[in-house]
Structures are given as C-alpha cells and as structure tokens.
Image (spheres, coloured by chain):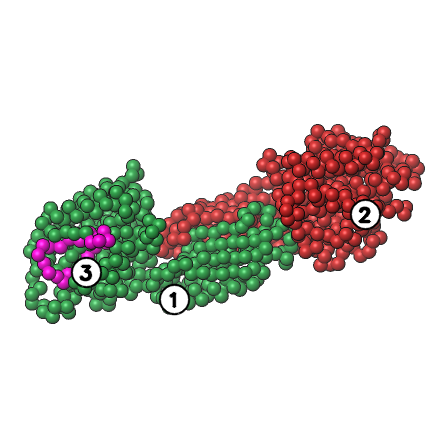
Chain colours: A red, B green
Amino acid sequence: MSLRINADRLLSDLTHLSQIGAGQDGALWRIAGTKADRAGRDWLDKTMRVEGLHTYYDETGNVFSRRRNTTGPWLLIGSHADTVPAGGHLDGAYGVIAAMEVLRTLHEEGHPLADHVESVAWFDEEGVRPESAGGLVGSTALAGSAHAADLVGYLEIHIEQGRRMEKAGLNLAPVTGIVGVRRYQVSVSGQENHAGTTMWVDRQDAGRVAARIVAELKSIILAVDPKGIGNAGVISFGPGAANVVPGTASAELEIRASSDRALDGIEADLDATLSRIAAEENCAAELVRISAKPAAHFDQRVLSAVHEACLEKGRTDQLLSYAGHDASVISTRLPTAMMFVPSTGGFSHSNKEHTPDEQLVLGAQALLDAVLKVAPMLLEQEVGSPVALAA
Amino acid sequence: MSLRINADRLLSDLTHLSQIGAGQDGALWRIAGTKADRAGRDWLDKTMRVEGLHTYYDETGNVFSRRRNTTGPWLLIGSHADTVPAGGHLDGAYGVIAAMEVLRTLHEEGHPLADHVESVAWFDEEGVRPESAGGLVGSTALAGSAHAADLVGYLEIHIEQGRRMEKAGLNLAPVTGIVGVRRYQVSVSGQENHAGTTMWVDRQDAGRVAARIVAELKSIILAVDPKGIGNAGVISFGPGAANVVPGTASAELEIRASSDRALDGIEADLDATLSRIAAEENCAAELVRISAKPAAHFDQRVLSAVHEACLEKGRTDQLLSYAGHDASVISTRLPTAMMFVPSTGGFSHSNKEHTPDEQLVLGAQALLDAVLKVAPMLLEQEVGSPVALAA
C-alpha cells in the first residue's frame, strides 16, 4: 500500500483547467451551461480517455471515468467542474483533478481496486443559472438515477473556503457533515408618514423593525447553536426617502446550523423575536421560509476511515462544512464523507483562491489513502468477499 | 375689536383652490413651477384684485396683495401656494387663504390697520424641483430682498401635520419655533465574503454596522433631547445577495431637534456610536452631514401676542414645529411667529389631509385677532406713534 499519486501531473492538470474560462485577472467564468464550462468538461473527458480509461457523459452532463470493461460496483470520487462568475481555480476543480489523479494512479499501478473506482465531474453545483437556483444539479440527478445502485459510496475532497484550518495549522481535515441552510424573507408593514411631524409614539416604522431583526440575528443564532452562522445580505425600506418614515421594509435572512433541530430552534426564536419587535414598533411582520437545505451528517464508518487517512499525514481535526457540496445530496443515497485542504486567507469564489502546492499534493495523496481504506470496507459489504479485492 | 372674518368666503375659497391641480382622488399636484401651480397663484392674484386690492408678483414668483396707494410699513401674513406631489388641500393653502381673508376683512371694515397688512402666497416652499431641493425658495428670496425693509414682522397659520393637538384636544396652538434638521449619509466599508464559510470572528460585515446604527438612532436622539425626532428612511447593503456577507452598506439618517446645540450633541453621539459599532464589526464607517437647516426660535413678544389670541378661543399650549415652514427663514430677518390648527389623524402630504371647518374658521379668526395685537405693537416700534393706528 505504498501507492503514490503523481504530484506533477496533479498540479499541471490543475493549471491547465484553470486556463479554461479564465478572464484577464485569472478569475474563472466556467458558469454551468456556458461554452467555457463545456470546454472544461470536454477537456476532463479527453484527458482521461487518452489514458485509456472509459469516459462518458450522463444525460445531465456529469462526466464520469472508470476502467474499461469493468462491471462495478464502484466507489465514486469527485467534485464539480463549474464555477461561480469570477470564481477561483480550486473550488470544485481541485476535487475533480484529485479524484482523476487517484483513479489514474490505481489504473497505472494495476491495483485491483482500480476496477472499483469511478471519478466524476459534477455538472452545475453552483446554481448560477436562474433555472438551477440552489445548484447541486448533477449530483441531485445522480442520487435519483439508476446508476446510483451501482455505487457503494462517495468521497469528495474540497478546499475549506474558510480560515479555520489555516488558523489552526491543519493540512487536512475530515468533514463530519454539512450545515443545513434556510433562507427567509422578512416583510414588514407599517405606516408611511412625515418624518418630522410624526412623534415616536405615533409611528409604525417598518424600517426600525427590519434593522432591529438584522441587528439581533447573530445573538439569536448563537443562543441556539454556538456553531451556527447566519447572514442578512439584502435589506430595503419603502418608499425610501430621508424624510419619510418607512411604511414598508424587507430583508433576506440566511441561517446555517449543524442540525435540522438547531435550524428549527433558530427559526422559532427568529419568528418570536420578529413578532415582539414588530409589536413594539406597532407594525405587522412576517417571516417566510423561501428555501431549506437539510443538514447532512456523513457516514460514521466512512468518516472514521477518512479521519485515519488524514491522521497518517499529521495533526488533524474534524470540521463541519458551512458551504454546500455535492456530497450533501449524495449522502442521502450513499455512504459518504469529505475532506478539506486549507484555503489561504479563507478566500473563495474569487481569483484570490489559493492553497499551497504541498497541501494540494498531500490532499490528493490522502484521498488515495482514504479510497484504499474505504473501498474495501464498502465493497466487502456489497459483494460479501474481501479476497477478490486484495492487492 | 369685534371684527369677524367671513367664514363662508374662507371655506369657499379653500374649496376653489383645492380644485386647481387636483387628481381624480382629490390629491393635489400644484408642484412649484408647473402649470397647475401657476394657475393657483393666478387665481389667488385675481381673487384679491377683484376685491379692489393691489396685487403683484415679485421676481421670484411670490404673490402679494395689499391696499392700493399705501406706503407701509406692513405686517406680512401668509403661507405657501405649492404642494408636494399628491399633496393635501390644506398644507400651505389654508394659511394663504386665511391671510387673504384677514386682509379682506380689515379692508372691507375700513380698519386703519388695513393699510399696514400685506398678504403673501410664497413660491416653492416644498422644494420638489431638483433645482430647489430644500425648498423655502420664495421666503428665502424675500428675506434677502429690499422689500423686507418695508415689513415689520410676519405671521403664519398652518395645519399641524401631526397628532399632538388632536390628542390633547386643542383647537389652536402658538408655535414657539421650528426644529433644526440635519441629514447624514452613513457609509460603511467592510469585506464582502462567503456567508457560510466566513466565521463570525473573521467577518467585516458592513450590513451589521448600518442596521445597528439605524436601530440605535432613536435612543441616541432621546438621550440628548427628549423632544428630538429622527428617521432612517434609506438603507442598502452591497453587493446585495442572501449568501454574501455585505462588504458595503449605506443609510441616510435625519435628525430634528429644538436647538442647534441639541443637534450638535446628537451629531457627536451619533458619530461616536457609529465609530464604536464599526470597530466592533471590524469595519470602517463615515458619517457625512449632507444638509443642515438651523433651528428657528420665534420672537418672544410676537409669540406672546399670538398666544393671547389663541387663549381667547379656549385652552391652548405652545408647540414646537417639527416640519419646516417659510416662517423659519423669515424669522432670521423679521419678528415672526406662527400658529397651528389640528390635523385630523395627523395626515399630511396626502389626500387624507383634513381639519374640521369650525377649526379652520376659528384659526382664521385667531389670525385676525393676532394681527390686531401684533401689528400695532410692531408698527409703534417702527413709526413711533400709536395714535395713527387706533381703530
């Protein structure tokens, strides 16, 4: 089990992919469905084909590769090939190239597990197109497809997109699950009025209600879940004049927490606080949930194996993912886990995305080592015989 | 001194003026400089001319009337003839018609003071046109004109545009002065970031700064001036997406207080609080004053006489005006005071503006009675002889 990935090939492939759809400043525009996105997937497909692997697009646009003439079952590994507008060169792309590198290493070395690993580049994770708001398009299609029955599990490596690992000095981290995300529309209705002649006591200031709930969002979340996160990214007052007391106001709130139960608790407190503030300001207010992604909890056995693979490379610590990933959807159908490499400065969704080469190489190697642990375990469960898979 | 105004003429003239520039719903569109505004002023001019009075437009567009062949000095009485878009039929118009009614009564009765009273319909008080933002155009021009030297003082009656009188059961109220008004632009600069992967401690959330200062505006004002008022009518977060931590935010704040000293105190506290909040949120913030109207304090002797005239009609109480009026500008040049009649429901700048007829009549009578007290006092001071003015 001293298989080594090819570090030069990994880095050179990443560089190549980072030139497809790049703007002048290096930011990437491989938005799902665009020509650049298609060119990227075509290049991934071709790259695996020239290595003698079998490649194919499914009807959604996901790109798969595996050894020719194998019958499965397979452990699926991969990530997504699309980017946000002006995105970075590692978000998604790193996990795709790392998975391809793992499969190629197994294939070249003639490792018996090579017949039981499939790599994937997911279509449209980011959900930038209006018709795919929410994203996770390719993985959602796979989770509901017949092909899922041929798979025994899923592993994904991704950049952290935050600063926790960098601050803690970690090179690798197993990921325990993915936060649930809920979005709400706050709509407040008061009474538009003269901002000079309307005394405080006579006001129905919808703007104050919106500002106060935005200001309290953080403490509401932390009181329920110390690991919870949230955001108020959108706000507006109507009619929007300096000398008119706002008669209407709206805001968009987002909450993220480690369990659906925590999300329920935050939602209830948010609703109660909004009602209290609205009553204090003589307004009517409504909290409407406009989207909800459930929290994902990864498979304990797969997670333990991934943790072991990370530990072999040094100090590590299990992390919760605050961003959504294809692994979240796939985990509803297959035993799944993820691992992170650090993001320098925490930058993501920008041309400032960066992870040092050594960490990128270490991550791909850890993914290979995790595959070597996880695949036998899941395949044994599936086919009932460990012998056929021994090296 | 038992002169009575003509209640029927007062109400019928008000009705007539309320039809010039009216929309289907009765809301008025006599925005300064429009055809409807000009038609309104032309009708006021004609109405006084047919009564045998001398009328004239000054170069700004203010419409004056007084007795023919008089040489002054005059006590000026009046209000403005223009409206906001979809405004009400009493804001300005009532004070104009009431002043005309007072002058006509004195004129018809052959009262010696009739030679020393001039009525005015001010041009463009509201400041709706972009080129006259801030308004008070006609009165500002008059205050700086040669004609001001021919005037001994100024009285104005206006609807309250708030609910204080209605709630206190007052029919008439002398006005002690007009709040000073300052407007500020709050600009906050933070760091736009991923709303999931950026932990609270790593955020520079410009939106939280803007929301928190808006939420604290009321308590900051009240701590300095219990009579202070304020408003946050405009707010926005950039880039404005539910899943992006706002990197920029802006808001417009307005404060109103009874003295410039109070405004200074509120401004200092606002600035200090904004700095503290910005520091807590790791952001930079700026409070920029974009406009300032000083507080007006009316002439004590004129105010006392007006108070007496109000008291003769029943219970009364001195009020501070929270809305701007032409009297504010004129008070910097001439001894000035105002009086209010109630606004039913506090509505103004809308077609819901209403004051019961009896109160409109009572107000115009009180204005006449105030003129009979104020004019001799100010004229005696000016011409040095009370005899010529006796009835």
Q: CA distance from mark 1 to mark 2?
A: 70 Å
- Work out whether A258 lies above or below A331: below
Q: Are marks 1 and 2 on the same chain?
A: no
Q: Are marks 3 and 2 on the same chain?
A: no
Q: Are marks 3 and 1 on the same chain?
A: yes
Q: Nearer the viewer, residue A133 or A25?
A: A25
Kindly identify which residue carries mark 1. B262
Disc 1 residue crowd, few under 14, some 14–19, many 20+, Cα 10 Å: many
**3 or 1: mark nearer the eye:** 3
Kindly identify which residue carries mark 3. B147
Residue extent of the magenta highlight: B58-80
| Place of residue B73 in the rendered image (x, y in percent of width and height, measured from the top left) | 14, 63
Label 3 chain ID = B
Which residue is painted at 15% across and 46% down in the image?
Answer: B46
Contact between labelled residues 2 and 1, with CB atoms less than 8 Å apart: no
Disc 3 residue crowd, few under 14, some 14–19, many 20+, Cα 10 Å: few
Q: Nearer the viewer, residue B214 or B142?
A: B142
Which residue is painted at 55% across and 49% down in the image?
Answer: B239
- Label 3 sits on what residue type? His
- Work out whether A64 lies above or below B116: above
| Place of residue B16 in the rendered image (x, y in percent of width and height, measured from the top left) | 20, 42
Asked which secondary structure carries label 3, the reply is helix
- Label 2 sits on what residue type? Asp
Magenta stretch contains residue A210 = no
Left or right for A33, reference B364? right
Label 1 chain ID = B
Which residue is painted at 76% across and 56% down in the image?
Answer: A170
Kindly identify which residue carries mark 2. A8
